[in-house]
Amino acid sequence: MKKNNIIYWISTGLIALIEGVMPALTSQSELAKEGIRHLGYPEYFGNVLVIFKILGVLTLVLPIIPKRVKEWAYAGFAFDFLFASISHGIVDGIGGQTFFPMIVFGFLIVSYIYYHKINNTN
């Protein structure tokens, strides 16, 4: 059980850092705004995305949040990673920016699997 908790918190912590802390700290930088524009999205989309990422991270890490809501957060992050990969692939071609969201998606899958192992739910 201890191993499951460690794996869950490491994978969830990486998601929290990559999808919550980093976007919260860098979302208003010119580089972040240019990244959103480069993909063809309006600037407000980046702001909305950061808000939802922060809410999603809080949902995943706070134990008080109901399990059903956590499931929606996992689904939201899955869509985020898949569509980020697709967007980068279409605009920039296949490269590092295309695969990085899939690496984080792997952390999300590990977090999801171990969340269910810890809570004995399928």
Image (cartoon, grey):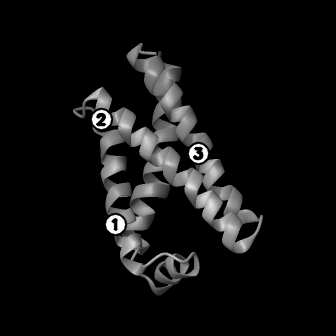
Q: Is residue 46 left or right of residue 59?
A: right
Q: Which residue is mark 3?
A: 105
**Residue 107 vs residue 49, the one in the foreground:** 49
- Rounded to the nearest angstrom, the CA distance separating label 3 from label 2 is 19 Å
Q: Residue furthest right?
A: 94
Q: Which amino acid type corresponds to the residue marked 1 in the rendered image?
A: Val
Please report contact status of discs 3 and 1: CB closer than 8 Å, yes or no: no
Q: Which amino acid type corresponds to the residue marked 2 in the rendered image?
A: Val
Q: Which residue is mark 2?
A: 69
Q: Measured along the vertical axis of the image, is residue 117 above or below residue 79?
A: above
**Mark carried by residue 117:** none
Residue at the image position 57 percent from the left and 60 percent from the top? 84
Q: Which residue is mark 1?
A: 48
Closer mark to the observer between disc 3 and disc 1: 1
- Rounded to the nearest angstrom, the CA distance separating label 1 from label 2 is 19 Å
Q: Measured along the vertical axis of the image, is residue 4 above or below residue 94?
A: above
Q: Which amino acid type corresponds to the residue marked 3 in the rendered image?
A: Phe
Closer to the N terminus: mark 3 or mark 2?
A: 2
Secondary element type, mark 3: helix
**Residue 21 vs residue 34, the one in the foreground:** 34
Q: Measured along the vertical axis of the image, is residue 75 above or below residue 31?
A: above
Q: Residue furthest bottom?
A: 30
**What is the number of callouts on the image?**
3
Closer to the N terminus: mark 1 or mark 2?
A: 1
- Rounded to the nearest angstrom, the CA distance separating label 3 from label 1 is 20 Å
Q: Can residue 2 be seen? A: yes
